[in-house]
Amino acid sequence: MIKLVRPRLITFDVTGTLLMTKLEEHYAEIGSHYGLSVDPRKLARSFRKSFRKLSIEHPVYGKHTGIGWENWWRKIVHNVFKDQHTFVSDATLDKVANNLIQCYGTSMCWHKYPGAIELLEYLKKKGLILGVISNFDERLEAVLVDTKIRFYFSFVLTSYEFGAEKPDTSIFDEALRLTKERHKINVTPQEAIHIGDSINNDYIGAKKANWNAILIQHDNGAEIEKKIPIEDVVRNLEDLRIHLSALLDRDM
């Protein structure tokens, strides 16, 4: 991070940063309602494989290829369950998918990380403009409302709405444009910080847009690439608040 410039805008990724989910648990629970028992480990592997494949074939949740985000997620659900139940009917899988799509638009499937509210309250009190930049579909507004954190953010910018995904630098440029439109001030990239859990999408994407960036690990102990300065990495949201307070509470 550039230490001499006090930030005016801080944006957050959402999933894996502010909100978490127990994917295997939710998929298994809803699948069981339709007689589909699953091995959680196999399910997680299938999900990652299918997510990567569809992200290549139908980027931005299918916005530009015509399938749309709901059918994009239905394909994921079909693939994940068919890996363990080859002969299950599409009609049954549609019911499972519809339930999961609904669940993942609410706080039933999303939960705040410890320290999320304390961090957002602290940053609001410091007078910072807060925003969201997330690779997500149209449900994100509802998710943030239902998890009771939407009102902290000046804007919520999703890849589906905008039409391009992180790490594309254009989505970071759009965040600066939205800030100017809503607050009548010009924030430079050097006055902005983006915080997220993905090295490529969040950290490298923000850096390529000439923003400052912080990578959050959530205590998962994963190895961080050596090219990322250690001072740009935090373990959890409490450490992030301490990290930011060292920047915000001193005389600039």
Image: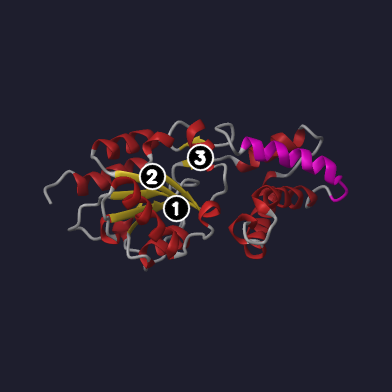
Question: Residue tagged by mark 2?
Answer: 236
Q: How crowded is the residue under tag 2: few (<14 C-alpha within 10 Å), some, or many (20+)? A: many
Up/down of 236 relative to 186, above or below: above
Distance, label 1 to label 3, CA atoms, is 20 Å
Q: Is residue 99 magenta?
A: yes
Q: Are marks 3 and 2 in contact (CB under 8 Å)?
A: no
Q: Are marks 1 and 3 in contact (CB under 8 Å)?
A: no
Disc with the residue nearer the chain's start (1 vs 2): 1
Question: Residue tagged by mark 1?
Answer: 197
Tell me which residue sits at (37%, 65%) in the image: 209
Can residue 122 be seen by looking at this rendering? yes
Disc with the residue nearer the chain's start (3 vs 2): 3
Q: Give the mark toward the camera: 3 or 2.
A: 3
For badge 2, the amino acid type reads Asn
Q: Please provide percent x and percent y for residue 117.
A: 37, 33
The label number, if any, that marks residue 141 in the structure image: 3
